[in-house]
Amino acid sequence: MHHPNFKDTIAASPYIFTIGVAGDSGSGKTTFTQGIRNIFGNDLVSTITLDDYHSLDREGRKAEGITALHPKANRIDQLEKDLIQLRRGVPIEKPVYNHATGTFDPPAIFRPQKILILEGLHTFSTLTLRKYLDFTLFVNPEHEVKYDWKIRRDVEKRGYSREAVMNEIREREPDYAQYVLPQIEYADAVIGIGYSEYGNELANSRNVYRITLSQKKLKQNLEDIDLSLDLYSMLSVSERNFSLKFERGCDHDDCQLSRLVIDGELSEHVVQRLEQSIEHQTKVHPISMFQNRTYVTAGDLAQLILCWRIIHSRIFLETIG
């Protein structure tokens, strides 16, 4: 199957393709859609952070005794209305939450691009939100990883004390389990993140983690798909540890899930073949997400595979449209 330059196709299409990313605060949601931003650029990709849809500011949540993870602390009904408008290509007046002050700034006009990414705690928590999202991703770091990240982010970038962050983590956990985690059931893909089997210290020194990419079976297939890893480069170039494992996962009685477990670091040559595959299918050149790097991490490879999966879903809409 031959396609024109896919950027041009998307730009000319009236369709707003929506991607929903859910997960806990500080779980790395932005990282795994960064490839889509890199490939298609800011003129075609826009992002909404759902923290803007908090209904209570920081002091308001304290006064009510609820966390930001509780649905009552969020304007989910307003998000639903705005998403419906955005899918139609209609600009909205979007609320703006200021993390530095814990209060709201004045609303701002938001115009959707042809690819719209929504990232937050409750991104596909309701039937209406799920109806208007084309692709859903849940990011699910293991507890130890998530806590380490949140402490690092909130202490270094947001100025909180370590003790305050730990207290917040403990307060938030029941709400996370009740209101955020159940969305995992509705995700087209789930990213699990754990410390590498080759050593926890690799996380801080080289951002190396063990990544589990769980995906629902593709509902549609396209011709001429090449999703190759360069085994020659793996065997002849790599001088660092890595592992790849594929598992079938069963959802109830039906095996509709597949799990790819990636750990360690791979030679950059290995992912070049994947980038070339995306170039071939989209005619978008050049795709070089990991330039000037000798090695890429398991997270990088998962990001690239997710890009391919999302683009695959968007191309399919053109073929049936």
Image (cartoon, helix red, strand yellow):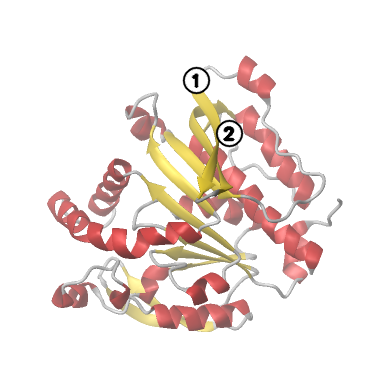
Q: Is residue 106 above or below residue 237?
A: below
* Position in image of residue 121 (x %, y %): 38, 64
Foreground mark, 2 or 1, reads: 1
Residue 292's tag is 2
CB under 8 Å between callouts 2 and 1? Answer: no
Residue at the right extreme of this rendering: 2
- Horizontal side of 213 relative to 199 (left or right) equals right
- Which element is circle 2 on? loop
Closest to the observer: 257 or 114?
257
- Quadrant, the C terminus: bottom right
- Which element is circle 1 on? loop
* Position in image of residue 60 (x %, y %): 20, 78
Q: What residue lies at 44% left-to-right and 57% top-to-bottom?
A: 184
Q: To which quarter of the image does residue 143 belong? A: top left
Closest to the observer: 125 or 118?
125
* Residue receiving disc 1: 240
Measure how far apart labels 2 and 1 are at the Cα level. Answer: 17 Å
Q: What residue lies at 50% left-to-right and 61% top-to-bottom?
A: 186
* Position in image of residue 128 (x %, y %): 51, 77
